[in-house]
Amino acid sequence: MKILITGAAGFIGANLVMQLLKREKAVEILGIDSLNDYYDPTIKNFRLGEIKKIVAEHLDSKWTFLKGNIADKELIDRIFNDFRPDIVVNLAAQAGVRYSITNPNAYIESNIIGFYNILEACRHSYDNGAEGVRHLVYASSSSVYGSNQKVPYSTDDKVDNPVSLYAATKKSNELMAHAYSKLYNIPATGLRFFTVYGPAGRPDMAYFGFTNKLLKGETIKIFNYGHCKRDFTYVDDIVEGVIRVMKKAPERQVGEDGLPIPPYAVYNIGNSNPEKLLDFVRILQEELVAAGVLPADYDFDAHKELVPMQPGDVPVTYADTTALENDFGFRPSTTLREGLRRFANWYKTFYSK
Ligand SMILES: NC(=O)c1ccc[n+]([C@@H]2O[C@H](COP(=O)([O-])OP(=O)(O)OC[C@H]3O[C@@H](n4cnc5c(N)ncnc54)[C@H](O)[C@@H]3O)[C@@H](O)[C@H]2O)c1
């Protein structure tokens, strides 16, 4: 089994690589990542170091890492020609909603051109009757739901009104994948991730930013007086879901008109269990104290400011994950306290070095 994972030094990518190496017998994984500095690349290198430790314990499998950009078409074509992946997991992307206001180019380059290169390479993997790519799994995002009010968010909901360029690129990925799936019979599954957190996570995400601020003695702003509810998913749970999905591609079928029905699916992958933001921050603070990141007598109340709702914010968002549960028997199981404990312990070790 040959697996190509893009964004392999990223938060979800690196955790996916590690789990695959631990669990699968004789797997060959090629990871590609540009190691860009959108956030501290030290964390990306740390993750690559963690992967190396696992490789050393699983010598039956093969891990290769390539620093490169998925927007480089020649490079992507060469990788597909030489490596000939059975499964492709595209996680490389420019993430983040706010950054897309100041750096739109990064989104077009990675999320549109990069993803197009992956689709083209999948298409040509079938040239000359080759078996080619058996499944393309790619990251979409809960941000495609924009400011939809109806919860839980369902993949049946209309998502034609993105409110950021980031969301627009993710929705575009779903549309492009559909076209390629229809035209070239590429089994493709899009996963709409809902806020993923955990050790060595992304510093641009709220829980990481809160931690940095609390540590510096700064005050954190909690909107809608902390009453907003969000779906948080622990990274190990997400990886479990991704692995189950990778192994079961949508079936290739022929319709009544004799033409292929696109082997295409999109799923929400989240917790379906929204947590109040104030509870999330309280548990985070308790676990940061328990891990020794914050002092035992930390005055949390003095460092939090409850403020009104921001315009455009949605009070409650969470995933309807029924389809994922029915099709893959997947349900996240890590509690918020356990997940935040692991994050706090990692943070303590990582930053005390
Ligand atoms: N973490 C979440 O909560 C979340 C939520 C919704 C969607 N997603 C999506 O899931 C995917 C993985 O997210 P993550 O949290 O691991 O993000 P991440 O930023 O940690 O990982 C993405 C990786 O891709 C790499 N990359 C970016 N552009 C590249 C390019 N052009 N070529 C090669 N590598 C490139 C980056 O260096 C990074 O290491 C992304 O597509 C993201 O948009 C994540």
Image (cartoon, grey):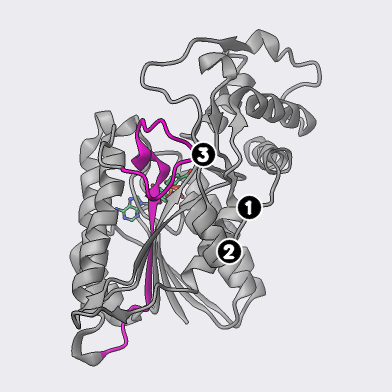
Relative vertical location of residue 146 with respect to residue 302 in this rendering, above or below? below
Identify which amino acid the numbered label 3 is placed on: Tyr
- Can residue 6 be seen by looking at this rendering? yes
Task: Kindly check if marks 1 and 3 are in contact, taking CB atoms under 8 A apart as contact.
Answer: no
Q: Is mark 3 within 8 Å of ligand 1?
A: no
Quote the CA–CA distance across marks 1 and 3.
13 Å
| Magenta run includes residue 326 | no
SS under mark 3:
loop
Q: Which residue is at a point 29% across and 55% down the rendered structure image? A: 174
Identify which amino acid the numbered label 1 is placed on: Pro
In the rendered image, which quarter is residue 56 located in?
A: bottom right
Task: Kindly check if marks 2 and 3 are in contact, taking CB atoms under 8 A apart as contact.
Answer: no
- Crowding at dot 2, Cα within 10 Å, few <14 / some 14-19 / many 20+, comes out as many
Identify which amino acid the numbered label 2 is placed on: Met
Tag shown at residue 332: 1
Relative vertical location of residue 216 with respect to residue 16 in this rendering, above or below? above
Q: Which residue is at a point 33% across and 45% down the rendered structure image? A: 94
Query: Is 106 displayed left or right of 40 in the figure?
Result: left
Quarter of the image containing the C terminus? top right
Could you say where residue 128 lies in the image, as x and y percent from the top left? 19, 91
Label 3 belongs to which residue?
Answer: 318
- Start and end of the magenta stretch? 130-158
Which sits earlier in the primary sequence, circle 2 or circle 3? 2
Relative vertical location of residue 81 with respect to residue 180 in this rendering, above or below? below
Tag shown at residue 10: none
Could you say where residue 264 lies in the image, as x and y percent from the top left? 33, 67
Tag shown at residue 18: 2
Q: Which residue is at a point 33% across and 72% down the rendered structure image? A: 263
Q: Nearer the viewer, mark 1 or mark 3?
A: 3
